Image (cartoon, rainbow, N blue to C red):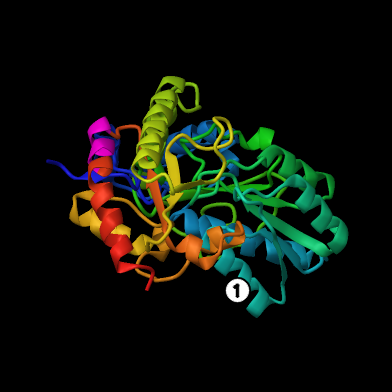
Amino acid sequence: MARAYLDHAATSPMPEVVLEAYTEALRSVGNPASTHAHGQQASELLESARERIAGALGCDAAEVTLTAGGTEAVNLALKGIYWARRRAGSGPIVLVAQGEHHATIEAAEWLRDSQGAEVVWLPIDADGVLQPSTLSRAIEQAGAENVTLISFLWVNNEVGSILPVAELCGIAEAAGIPSHVDAVAALGQVPIDFAASSASALSVSAHKIGGPVGVGALVLGRRTVADSLLHGGSQQRARSGSQNVAGAVAFAAALDVALGENGVPDPERTARLARLRDRLVAGVREIDPSAVLRGTSTEHTRVPGNAHFTFPGCQGDSLVFLLDAAGVSVSVGSACQAGVAEISHVLLAMGLTEAEAAGALRFTLGADTREAEVDSLLAALPSALERARSAGLN
C-alpha cells in the first residue's frame, strides 16, 4: 500500500501540470534582463507569470517581488521596511505577534540584537489568534510614532486558525504604521486579496501549494518602502539578482491549479477538504476521547486542511516516529524546526503547559489527499498511541 502523506503544510506535492510547466520553462534560454531576443523571450515568460501571481494575490504586478522562498520574503519585509522607516525617522519599536513562524521570530530578534530594534511581543489567545484589541492596546501603549512595523500571520501555520487580517491591518493603517502579513500558510486555503486587506506587505511561498521549493514572493504595496537585502543589479524593486523564470512560471501554474480562474480556492474543492478533515477529526476523537483539537473550530475561522491535536501522556516526536514506521507521514509542527527537540512555542504562547504541548501532532491535508490516507492514519493511530504512552513523556 502507498504511504499516506498528511503533512501538506510542510510541503505539498507538485501536480503533473505544474511539473510540465516547470520543466518546459527550464528549457528556455536567456536571462530576462538581457536585451537580445532570447532575453526578451525569457522576460515575457517571467512577466506573464508575475501578472498571474499578482492576479491571484489581489495586487498589481509591480508590487510583486519574486524571492527564493517564504523565509527570504519575510526577512526582506521585516528588515527592509525597518531600515527604510528608521532612516525616515520612525521609532525603533517592532510589534510582532507571539506564535509566529521562526522566519519572523528570528528576523525580529536579529533586528533587536544587531540593529537596535525594540521588539514587543503581542500575546495571542487560546486559539492562536492575535485579537484586534490587543494590537490597538499595544500601539496606544507604545505610541504610534515610536512603532516602525507590525507583523503577524494570516493563518497560524501550526493550529490552522485564521486571523482577522483586514481588521488588524486597518488598525495599523489608521495609526500610520506599515503591516507585514505572513500569508504562507494561508495561500490556497483562504482567499487572499492584498488590496482589500490594507496590508503594506505580504509574504507567500510556492511549495505550500505544489510549486517548487525555493520560490516565493513578497508583495510590497506601492507606497511601502523597503531597503534591499541583496545588492548587485537592481533587477526587482528591493531585490537584486537574476530572476528565476522557471520558478515564477511554476509558481503561477501552481496558483492556477490551487485557485482556478476566479483567483480563489475552489468552493467544491474546499468543501471536500473540510469534509475529509472533519472525518479525520471525528476518527481521532473516537480513538482517543482525551485528545484535544487545538485552534479555532468553526468553519470560517479555521483553514479546511488543518487538524492539530494534543494527545495527553505522549511525546509528539514519538508519535511521528511510530506513525512513520506504519507508513503515515505527519508532523509535530513547522518543518523548519524538524529534528529539533523542543516544545512548540506556538502552543506555549496559546497558554498550554509544557506537558500539554509535548503531545502535539499536526495533520494537514491537500487537494489530492485520498480517503484511504485518512483510513491509514486512523488504523495506525491506536497502536502508536499505546506505544507512545508506554514510553511516557521522558
Total of numbered circles in the picture? 1
Where does label 1 land, which residue?
110
Element type where label 1 sits in the image: helix
- Asked if 300 appears above or below 4 in the picture, the reply is above
Percent across and percent down for residue 219 are 58, 46
Q: Is the stretch drawn in magenta largely helix, strand or loop?
A: helix
- Asked if 313 appears above or below 271 in the picture, the reply is below
Tell me which segment is drawn in magenta. Answer: 370-376
Q: Say if the magenta span includes residue 372.
A: yes
Residue 261 found in image quarter: top left
The front one of 296 and 48 is: 296
Q: Say if the magenta span includes residue 67.
A: no
- Asked if 85 appears above or below 215 in the picture, the reply is below
Give the crowd class for mark 1: few <14, some 14-19, many >=20 residues within 10 Å.
some
In the picture as drawn, the residue positioned furthest to the left comes out as 1
Residue 94 found in image quarter: bottom right
Name the residue at 61% across, 72% down. 109
Name the residue at 66% across, 35% down. 195
Percent across and percent down for residue 252 are 41, 36
Image quarter (top left, top right, bottom left or bottom right) of the C terminus: bottom left
Amino acid carrying mark 1 in the image: Trp
Percent across and percent down for residue 318 are 31, 63
- Asked if 56 appears above or below 136 in the picture, the reply is above
